[in-house]
Amino acid sequence: MDIQLNEASRSWQETVRDYVDRELIPWEVEAELNGGELPPGILQGIHDGAVALGLPGMDAPRDQGGLQLGMVDQVVAWEALGRVTNALCWCFPEAQSWMYEACADSEYQLESYIRPLLEGRRREAYAITEAESGSQEVINTLARKDGDGYRITGEKWFVTTGNLADFFFLQAKTDEGEDALFLVDKESPGIEMVENPLFSHTFPSHHPTYRFTDVVVAARNRIGGPGSGMDYSRSWFRHERMTIAARMLGAAARMIEEATAWARERQILDEKLIDKQAVQFMLADCVTELWAARLMVYEAAQAHDRGEDLKSLHARCSMAKLYATEMANRVADRCLQVWGGRGYRRDNAVERFYREVRVDRIWEGSSEMQRMIIASALAKRGLDGM
């Protein structure tokens, strides 16, 4: 069930898959049974391997030291990385192309924040979501002008990887009511982690709540020009929705492979579990939905590489994320059922995926939010404009 790729893309796929199989998957159970944590030396080796492959710079411009891969090749990589549980594939920072565009006029921002991401020397986190956020964007965090800089006050929820990050991409409203993005060092005075709740999954990357109280941020740490904050946030959302969709392909494929291998092995009286029609139907539905999702995600990636209309791409990213995440959840449910009681053990990858893929229908825009985006695009531009 392969997507047709050119020779370079196929080689890249094999390279990333080899890294995943060799460096990441063998550590899943240890991470699961130790709160998501691995020994520091192991983590450093995994991180260094990712940096050596250039994974932090998949989307970064070539003239800045990145790989400048097309979206198809980025999807190829994230599909392979999605085969791993416990978010072990989140072992590297990402220097995305929009960051270079946003920071193009500031050598300070590039040198202090973006290049260190590319080189794996710093980690980022996105402080975007707030307590009141939901299907609609809510920004109550204020950035008040103060001399040559700003004072930022507010609270951010679900700051994924905040516990591991060195700095935040923080979204706030200025005195003029403009959306703005800021680079904020995590150790700045006035930043407090007020909650670090446990979640269903067991990830080394946590999702804390941070309170910002009169945090002084220099003017040079504001990203882009007036009113550009939400534009860059949307660029990030498009990228994240595509990579989430790609990870769901990898997760679903691995669950299907492991459930199929188990069904072939499991003896039920005088026949194998794979010979039971009920099991065959569940696996057939899984494979069919995975194939449909793959076609959708890769076509959306090809549309990016063709440079199609940005509004159309925004809708396609939403469709890809919506379908792929819901597909992966259905696959997880069926595959766990195939495994039976053994599928409920935490040392079983399907059990971990069952918990982990559920959140992908929520973050970076819930399934309901994606439906609203898709329906809005349909109303404005019609089916041919999607």
Image: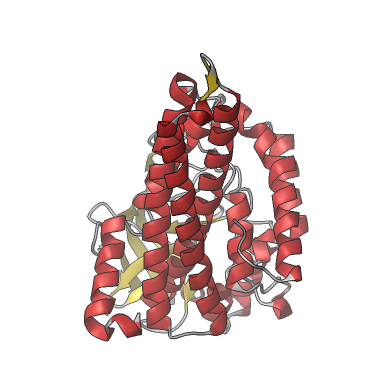
In-front residue for pair 103/22: 22
Q: Quadrant of residue 133?
A: bottom left
Q: Residue at x 76, y 62 (%)?
A: 11
In-front residue for pair 190/381: 381
Tell me if residue 204 can be seen: no
Name the image quarter holding the N terminus.
Answer: bottom right
Q: Quadrant of residue 12?
A: bottom right
In-front residue for pair 293/371: 293
Q: Residue at x 60, y 69 (%)?
A: 72
Residue 375: image x %, image y %? 24, 71
Tell me if residue 289 can be seen: yes
Q: Residue at x 44, y 69 (%)?
A: 238
Above or below 286: residue 119: below
Above or below 335: residue 345: above
Residue 312: image x %, image y %? 39, 80
Q: How is the image coloured?
A: secondary structure
Residue 100: image x %, image y %? 58, 77
Give the residue at the far top of this rendering.
269
Residue 315 located left or right of residue 255: left
